[in-house]
Amino acid sequence: MTEFNVLSDSTPWQTGFKERWRASYESAGLGAAAAERMAGDWCTGNDWTVAEITDAGAHAGYVAVAVTDVNGALAGRVGDLHLDVSHAGRGHERAARDWAEGWCAERGARRLDIRLTEPAGELFDGYRIRGQLRARRVGSAPEPTDGVTGRPMTHAEYPDWLAFEKDAYVGDIVRSGALNPEEAVRKSDRDFAELLPEGLSTPDNTFLVLEAAGERIGTGWLKHGYVPGVSYGYSLHVEEAHRGKGYGRAAMAVGEQATLAAGDSVLMFTVWGGNEVAMNLYTSAGYRIVEESRSVGLPRSAA
């Protein structure tokens, strides 16, 4: 019989939790310092309620949950759902998922989010994909492909680029189902103001105009040192008129060149749920899933 006991002291869980997340980041290709930083941010940046999972009174694992206000609406989160190997595959995982959904729904959450570092499997297959964090270790500077090169963006080009990126960000958020259009606009304004306080002159950022045969085909934006040794690609965009010509992979090669030039060795991207074209491109280019965010509406029926 699966039972859940909320802990007053979650220290034993916290230690194992961080170790598991750090190991998952390292296995995805991140260096030790980057893995430590990302695991620390995720594990300590949340106020989790932790329940011990027991099987006939014996310790079986942990489930960690939280409910927070997200843009004026309550959302639940599952921070961890872990079964010891000796208790795995006996139905405790499903019981823990159902317990987490019920716990959050009882506290007013209308959505439940989970962040995974492993394939969702049957347990979370019914949860909608919100986004994926993808990464690839860049061993050496790739050769330019399909004649695609990148040059620095000019101050004259920046305003139009910024307006386009903010609108595209809103569209990605809405398409993923994370927020409604009004909430997405507010998030876009807030995030860009925080990320680019000095605009084109914001330190440790690279803004590129992608060209082929002297013609502009797209743009790119990377943040270097996002975590130690990692550049984060906020955007690599191929304009619609130039899509379907193989430029997507070539644009990523330009981003990889900029990553190495900045002294980083890993390039990381987020792809929003619903963008299967980008997911397939990243997979074909060797970008592994570091994290996958999924969600489901609450309350859910037992079925």
Image: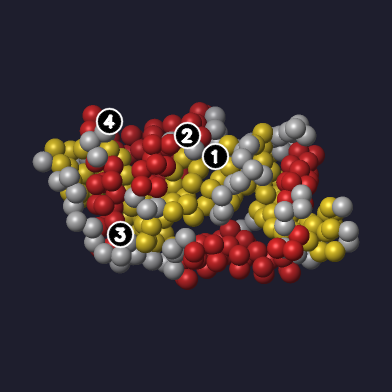
Distance from the alpha carbon under mark 1 to that under mark 4: 25 Å
What amino acid is labelled 4 in the image? Answer: Glu
The foreground one among 41 and 81 is: 81
Extreme-left residue of the structure: 214
The reply to whether callout 1 and callout 2 are in contact (CB within 8 Å) is yes
Secondary structure state at the residue bearing disc 1:
strand
**Residue 155 left/right relative to 269:** left
Above-or-below relation of 195 to 164 = below
Identify the residue under disc 2: 274
Secondary structure state at the residue bearing disc 3:
helix
Secondary structure state at the residue bearing disc 2:
loop
Identify the residue under disc 1: 129
Q: Mark 3 or mark 2, which is nearer the start of the sequence?
A: 3
Distance from the alpha carbon under mark 2 to that under mark 4: 18 Å
Q: Is residue 268 visible?
A: no
Q: Residues within 10 Å of mark 1 (few under 14, many from 20)?
A: many
Identify the residue under disc 4: 240
Q: Mark 1 or mark 3, which is nearer the start of the sequence?
A: 1
Q: Mark 4 or mark 1, which is nearer the start of the sequence?
A: 1
**Residue 39 left/right relative to 7:** left
Distance from the alpha carbon under mark 3 to that under mark 4: 25 Å
Mark number, residue 259? 3
Which of discs 3 and 1 lies nearer the camera? The answer is: 1
Considering the image in quadrants, where does the C terminus appear?
top right
Q: Residues within 10 Å of mark 2 (few under 14, many from 20)?
A: some
Identify the residue shown where x is 74% and y is 46%: 94
The foreground one among 279 and 202 is: 279
What amino acid is labelled 2 in the image? Answer: Gly
What amino acid is labelled 3 in the image? Answer: Thr
The reply to whether callout 3 and callout 1 are in contact (CB within 8 Å) is no
The foreground one among 302 and 12 is: 302
